[in-house]
Image (tube, helix red, strand yellow):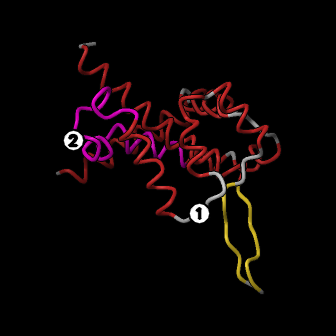
Amino acid sequence: MPAEQERFHKAVAAMLDSVMFENWLRFYFLREDEVSEGKYVLSIAIPEKGLDRIRERFPEFLSMAEELNGRELSLDVSRNAVCNFIRDHYEGDLIPTGSVAAYFDTHAFQIGLQLFNIWVQAYEKALEQNFLDFAGWQNAFTQWCESEQAVQIRDELKAELLRHEH
């Protein structure tokens, strides 16, 4: 595989890992607090022991965990955390400067993102029952992506994207 193509695949994988990590944080560390009668806010609440584990096992994502920890969550907060993380950590290295938005729009990223969302929804109950650290999520998702079901879904998603191009 040519070096440029290999770099592209590494960039897309790193971007997907960033999305997955933010999702993992929300999945396991989401807290709902009542701020006034009947009004609730959602936030990320990572205990110190959890931050220590992230420091040890996933130091590349520590800055995202620290940025989100204790913050009230919204779609914008989550999206900005992921986009800023990708821009700060991968642009200029894996992703050519000024190309982050274009990488988000690629078929490879869009299909990977849709597969991840399908996986989370399909395995939500199992993921809730057994805490998996982030490496566990990565491994489970990778194994599922190699399954016959995931390959079929990926092929359908590719075909759908191609139909919309023409």
Residue range in magenta is 89-117
- Residue ID at (46%, 63%): 76
Q: Nearer the viewer, residue 113 or 28?
A: 28
What is the spatial separation of the Cα atoms under label 2 and label 1, in whole angstroms?
A: 27 Å
Image location of residue 160, percent across then percent down: 33, 49
Q: Amino acid at mark 1?
A: Leu
Please tell me which of labels 2 and 1 falls first in the chain.
1
Mark 2 nearby-residue class (10 Å; few <14, some 14–19, many ≥20): few
Secondary structure beneath dot 1 equals loop
Image-quadrant location for residue 53? top right
Q: Amino acid at mark 2?
A: Gly
- Residue ID at (47%, 41%): 153
Q: Of the numbered discs in the image, which one, if any, rests on residue 91?
A: none
Q: Is residue 137 left or right of residue 32?
A: left
Report which residue position mark 2 lands on.
98
Mark 1 nearby-residue class (10 Å; few <14, some 14–19, many ≥20): some
- Residue ID at (79%, 37%): 49
Secondary structure beneath dot 2 equals loop
The answer to whether residue 107 is magenta is yes
Report which residue position mark 1 lands on.
73
Q: Which corner quadrant holds the N terminus?
A: top left
Main secondary structure along the magenta-highlighted residues: helix
Image-quadrant location for residue 162? top left
Residue 82 vertical position relative to residue 108 in the rendered view, above or below: below
Q: Nearer the viewer, residue 104 or 71?
A: 71
Q: Is residue 41 left or right of residue 105?
A: right
Image location of residue 32, percent across then percent down: 74, 66
Q: Nearer the viewer, residue 103 or 65?
A: 65
Q: Is residue 166 left or right of residue 42?
A: left
